[in-house]
Amino acid sequence: MSSLLEMRSVSKIFGSGETATHALTDFSHIVDEDKPSITAIAGESGSGKSTAARLILGFEKPTTGQVLYRGKDLQSISGSERRQFRQEVQAIFQDPFGVYNPFYRVDRLLHTPIKSFKLAKNKAEANEKIRVAMRTVGLNPDEVLGRYPHQLSGGQRQRITIARALLLQPRLILADEPVSMVDASLRASILDSLLTLNREFRISFMYITHDLTTAYQIAERLMVLFRGTLVESGPVADVVRAPKHPYTQLLVSSIPSPDPTKPWGQDAASAKDPAETFGTTGCPFASRCAHVMPECRSTVPPKFQVGRAAVACFLYKDRPLAGEPTANSQQVLLQTR
C-alpha cells in the first residue's frame, strides 16, 4: 500500500502556557493512493475538525508530528512537489459564496485553474473541459456560464466549486461542511455528486462535518473528534448504529428521530453540564461523562479494539489495545476492508 497523504501523530497547539489551546492531539490518518475511500471526520464545534483540514492542506504547521505527502514532509517539499500537491489535493469549503469574487462571472473560477496548471492547449479545449466537468456534477453549462455568483443558487455555486476541483483531476478532495449552507432538498444530490467522483473518477474524500446523518450517507469510515482528541473510529455503520464512546452516543442521540412517539434523546447517556471546566489531564470528556472513573481524570485512555471500532475509553479496558495483534485481528482487518 502506498500512501498519498499521511497524518502521523499530528498535534496542533495555539498559544502557550496556561492559555494554550490544544486544537488537535496525536491525530493519525492515512489516505491510500491505490484504494480511493471516503472518510468522515465528525464532532461538535471546536472539536478540531477544521484544524485537521488546515493541517492537511498545509495552511498550518503541526506543533508535533508530521503531515506527509507521498512520503515527504509537507512542510519541506520542493516547489515542483508543492505544485503537484496543490493539483492532487483539492478543497471544497463550507460557504459556496465565499470562494467567489462578486465582480467576476463564475467562468473565471473555472478558467483560472486550467490556465494556472496549463491543462488545455487552447480556449476551445478549456471550454470543453469546463462543460464536461459541469455536466458531471449535474449542472447545465448553458444555464450557469456567463452569470455572476449572486445570480445563482447556493446549490449551483457549490456544484461549480466541485466542478472546479474536478478540473484538476485530483486524487484527494477535502470537503469541509460542503452541504451545511445548502437547502436540505439539494443536499442529497450534492452528496450523490461526490459519490460519483469517488466511484467513477477514483477520488478519495475526507468529509468534515458536524452532521452524522450526511456522514452516514456518504462515508465508509467515521472518525469522531472531541476537543481535538480522536475518541472513536471505525466503519461508519458500526459507529453510528452502535456507538461505543459516551461522547459518540451523545452525538448519535442528538439526531432527531422520525418516530414522533419516541422522545428525542431518550437513548442518550446522561451528561453533565457541557460548560463545566475541563481538566488538563486525563480524558478530555471526563467532566461531561456519566460513566467517569478515577483513572479517567488522571490518565488519557488509549484506544481499545471493540469489534471493528477503536475506542478511547476506559469502559473497554478489558479489550485489547487497537493495533495489537490478536487471534482474530486478521479477521477484523478483512472485515474492515
Image (spheres, rainbow, N blue to C red):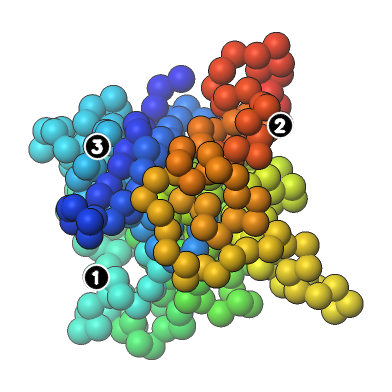
| SS for dot 1 | helix
* Residue, disc 3: 64
Question: As shown in the figure, which amino acid type bears the numbered disc 2?
Answer: Gly
Question: Which residue sits at x=38%, y=88%?
Answer: 151
Relative to 21, residue 3 above or below: above
Residue 205 place in picture, x, y as percent: 47, 47
Image quadrant where one finds the C terminus: top right
Question: As shown in the figure, which amino acid type bears the numbered disc 1?
Answer: Arg
Residue 204 place in picture, x, y as percent: 47, 42
Q: Earlier in the sequence, mark 3 or mark 1?
A: 3
Residues packed near mark 3 inside 10 Å, few (<14), some (14 to 19) or many (20 plus): some
Residue 109 place in picture, x, y as percent: 27, 68
Question: As shown in the figure, which amino acid type bears the numbered disc 3?
Answer: Thr
Query: Which numbered dot is residue 307?
Result: 2
The part of the image, by quadrant, that contains residue 64 is top left
* Residue, disc 1: 108
Question: Which residue sits at x=63%, y=63%?
Answer: 271
Relative to 176, residue 157 above or below: below
